[in-house]
Amino acid sequence: MIIRIVRMTFQEDKVDDFLEIFNNSKNKIRHFEGCHHLELLKDANLPNIFMTYSYWESENYLNQYRDSELFQKTWAATKALFKEKPIAFSSERVEIIE
């Protein structure tokens, strides 16, 4: 399982545009083959910073999504709204402590 986190800083006046893009694509992303979980997080102190947090069956499924028309279209629209370059990384869970 791959955990993918993408941190995005938007121009302050483009946040609503991003939320519209996300709301229009979130169900398609979540139900893309290999995606097991999708969340949208917002920075607690900076209202123009958001993170997507998703679980993917494998790196292969994540790459299939990244090569898809859905991603290409969504990312092109989203990237036009950035204030700073996004930060993305993939991780594997090591342990859950309860």
Image: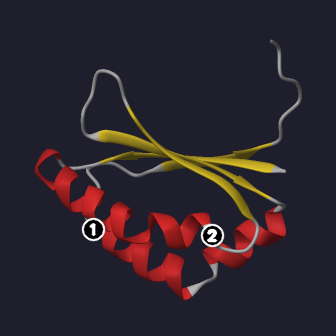
> Seen in the image, is 46 located left or right of residue 37?
left
Disc 1, SS: loop
In terms of depth relative to the viewer, which is nearer, 38 or 11?
A: 38
Provide residue 85's location: percent of width, then percent of height. Answer: 40, 52
Above/below status of 10 relative to 80 = above
Q: Label for residue 23?
A: none
In terms of depth relative to the viewer, which is nearer, 37 or 89?
A: 37
Q: Which residue lies furthest to the bottom in this view?
A: 69
Mark earlier in primary sequence (2, 1):
2
Above/below status of 57 relative to 3 = below
Q: How crowded is mark 2: few (under 14 residues within 10 Å), some or many (20 or more)?
A: few
Disc 2, SS: loop
Provide residue 39's location: percent of width, then percent of height. Answer: 53, 46
Residue with the mark numbered 1: 80
In terms of depth relative to the viewer, which is nearer, 44 or 12?
A: 44
Residue with the mark numbered 2: 31
Alpha-carbon span between mark 2 and mark 1: 25 Å
Provide residue 53's location: percent of width, then percent of height. Answer: 58, 45
Going by the numbered disc 2, the residue's amino acid type is His
For image coordinates 60% across by 84% down, the residue present is 68
For image coordinates 46% across by 64% down, the residue present is 26
Residue 34, quarter of picture: bottom right
Q: Which residue lies furthest to the top in this view?
A: 98
Above/below status of 50 relative to 47 = below
For image coordinates 83% across by 14% down, the residue present is 97
> Seen in the image, is 72 located left or right of residue 9?
right
Q: How crowded is mark 1: few (under 14 residues within 10 Å), some or many (20 or more)?
A: few
Provide residue 30's location: percent of width, then percent of height. Answer: 59, 63
Going by the numbered disc 1, the residue's amino acid type is Ala
> Seen in the image, is 23 located left or right of residue 87?
left
Q: Residue furthest left?
A: 13
